[in-house]
Image (cartoon, rainbow, N blue to C red):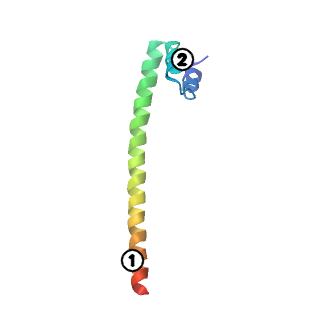
Amino acid sequence: MTLIEKLSNLGGIVDRDEMAKACSEIPDEDLRLALMTLALTYNQNIKINEEIFQKQHREIERLQKEIDKLKKAK
């Protein structure tokens, strides 16, 4: 089984003991590489989520201004 296959299998595990057992079967060097990849992915995810939040916040503000404008027009 390749490292990618082993790591893919970890994604479906929710039990901590089962996760520990599965991780113990993966060589330490591979786990370090996987941890580094996970950290980079996590940081990128945070950045993307912040960008999405900012975009949605701007859209909400724009729509709120439009709503206020329509209310005044009544």
* Disc on res. 68: 1
The relative height of residue 29 versus residue 62 in the rendered view (above or below) is above
Q: Residue 28 in the image: x percent, y percent?
A: 44, 13
The relative height of residue 57 versus residue 39 in the rendered view (above or below) is below
Residue behind mark 2: 22
Furthest-bottom residue in this view: 74
Q: Residue at x 39, y 77 (%)?
A: 68
Seen in the image, is 67 located left or right of residue 1? left
> In the rendered view of the protein, which quadrant contains the N terminus?
top right
Q: Residue 2 in the image: x percent, y percent?
A: 59, 18
Q: Residues within 10 Å of mark 2 (few under 14, many from 20)?
A: some
Q: Residue at x 44, y 35 (%)?
A: 41
Nearer to me, 39 or 21: 21
Q: Residue at x 58, y 29 (%)?
A: 12
Q: Residue 74 in the image: x percent, y percent?
A: 44, 87
For label 1, the SS is helix
Q: Which image quadrant for residue 11?
A: top right
The relative height of residue 1 versus residue 37 in the rendered view (above or below) is above
Type of amino acid under label 1 = Asp
Q: Residues within 10 Å of mark 1 (few under 14, many from 20)?
A: few
Type of amino acid under label 2 = Ala
Nearer to me, 19 or 15: 15
For label 2, the SS is helix
* Distance between mark 1 and mark 2 Cα atoms: 56 Å
Decide which of tag 1 and tag 2 comes sooner along the chain.
2
The relative height of residue 64 versus residue 22 in the rendered view (above or below) is below
